[in-house]
């Protein structure tokens, strides 16, 4: 071991902070050329915020997300207003979104509908995409939908049938795909069973929800393998990760490696679920876009415009954005 010569030592350099606006591109093999981001901030995000935003702010949020290049933006839910008061103004919101479809061709503004009453409200507002939402576990089905898993599937059946007849695609969400706060780890076979039932009803896409964010990448691969064994390929699947344990990006990469091409995320990492107390925000869209663009994967999103939108919304909500990328880009 050599003793360092103190005379030769350089004076310690002042730490410098480099602010990078865009990630360097360094592709990895076996990943898709593009990913469709299903933005859930205005729905999954805002449904769990303490502050209920004025409808004009919600409309501006959605318009700014569209301007930033997002083309699927889950705008609201038509659930019972007492169950999710933060989104009770969906009827006031939709008229304010009327011009967006013309301005941004291909823009889709899906909503959650739990039952026929919700579908009627969505149809009356000219909605063109809906989603039903089931649970892989009985405990969460009871808490979120006031029904067993089987009863909730019965509730969805006429929704999917009527929407499909009206030419409206129906996304199926499946919650608690990895862990459940009341039941613990959820077996792959149980998740695949309910997921396949949702697809059999006629859902065009199944979004696999890690509602409380406990999943890890090996579990993601195992779940995709479980669906593949039942003939459900990754092209029919989306992933929906909450970031409670910091696993959302790693899980997303595992899903992309497994062939999934649709990823749910919420601008600024907003969100959670009011009926699953350990759920925190979704994977932040900015963190996702940083990784995807770094991998050379197209998203159509202008990252800086998106981060500026989330910083603006954080001001409206009166708290900083939990997204690392938003803080790095706008702090
Ligand atoms: P219920 O109390 O069993 O409802 O709730 P009901 O069918 O017995 O009806 C009771 C009354 O509510 C009736 O009125 C209905 O008309 C009315 P009355 O005849 O007594 O005057 N009603 C409605 N009103 C307006 N809109 C409606 C509606 N439905 C019934 N759609 C229900 C059952 C499903 C309605 C309730 O449990 C509910 O609204 N749940 C929604 C909970 C929710 O939105 N949770 C968050 C979204 S899920 C999520 O975040 C997870 C996800 O992100 C994926 C993941 O992360 O895992 C998707
Ligand atoms: Mg969610």
Image (tube, rainbow, N blue to C red):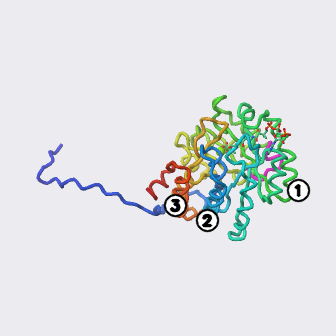
- The label number, if any, that marks residue 69 in the structure image: 2
Residue 40 location (% of width, % of height): 65, 52
Quarter holding the C terminus is bottom left
From the viewer's perspective, tell me whether residue 3 is left or right of residue 73.
Answer: left
Instruction: Give how far apart the Cα atoms at labels 3 and 1 are.
Output: 40 Å
Secondary structure beneath label 1: helix
User: Is residue 259 shown to the viewer in this render?
Assistant: no
Secondary structure beneath label 2: loop
Q: Which residue is mark 1?
A: 165
Q: Nearer the viewer, residue 101 or 164?
A: 101
Classify residue 277 by image quadrant: top right
Frontmost of labels 2 and 3 is 3
Instruction: Look at 51% across and 57% down and name the residue there.
Output: 290
Instruction: Look at 11% across and 52% down and name the residue there.
Output: 7
Instruction: Look at 51% across and 56% down and name the residue there.
Output: 311
Q: Please provide the residue range marked out in magenta.
A: 197-205
Residue 163 location (% of width, % of height): 84, 54
CB atoms of marks 2 and 3 within 8 Å: no
Secondary structure beneath label 3: helix
Classify residue 300 by image quadrant: bottom right
Quarter of the render that holds ligand 2: top right
Instruction: Give how far apart the Cα atoms at labels 2 and 3 are.
Output: 13 Å
Q: Which residue is mark 3?
A: 308
């Amino acid at each position: 071991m050599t003793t360092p010569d103190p005379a030769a030592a350089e004076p310690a350099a002042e730490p410098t902070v480099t602010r990078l606006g865009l990630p360097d591109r360094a592709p990895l093999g076996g990943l898709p050329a593009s990913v469709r981001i299903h933005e859930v901030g205005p729905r999954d995000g805002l449904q769990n915020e303490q502050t209920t935003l004025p409808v004009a702010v919600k409309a501006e949020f959605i318009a700014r997300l569209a301007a930033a290049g997002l083309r699927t933006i889950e705008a609201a839910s038509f659930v019972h207003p007492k169950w999710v008061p933060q989104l009770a103004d969906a009827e006031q919101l939709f008229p304010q979104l009327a011009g967006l479809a013309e301005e941004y061709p291909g823009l889709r503004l899906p909503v959650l509908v739990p039952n026929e009453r919700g579908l009627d409200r969505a149809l009356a507002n000219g909605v063109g995409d809906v989603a039903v939402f089931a649970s892989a576990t009985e405990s969460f089905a009871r808490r979120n939908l006031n029904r067993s898993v089987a009863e909730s599937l019965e509730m969805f059946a006429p929704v999917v049938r009527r929407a499909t007849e009206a030419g409206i695609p129906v996304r199926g969400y499946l919650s608690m795909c990895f862990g459940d706060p009341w039941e613990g780890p959820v077996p792959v076979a149980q998740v695949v069973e309910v997921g396949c039932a949702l697809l059999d009803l006629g859902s065009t896409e199944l979004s696999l929800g890690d509602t409380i964010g406990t999943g890890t990448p090996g579990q993601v691969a195992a779940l995709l393998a479980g669906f593949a064994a039942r003939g459900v390929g990754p092209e029919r699947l989306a992933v929906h990760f909450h970031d409670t344990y910091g696993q959302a990006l790693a899980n997303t990469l595992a899903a992309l490696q497994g062939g999934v091409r649709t990823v749910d995320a919420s601008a600024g990492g907003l969100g959670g679920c009011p009926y699953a107390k350990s759920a925190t925000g979704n994977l932040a869209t900015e963190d996702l876009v940083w990784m995807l663009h770094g991998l050379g994967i197209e998203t159509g999103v202008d990252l800086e415009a998106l981060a500026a939108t989330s910083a603006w919304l954080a001001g409206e909500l009166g708290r900083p954005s939990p997204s690392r990328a938003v803080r790095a880009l706008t702090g």
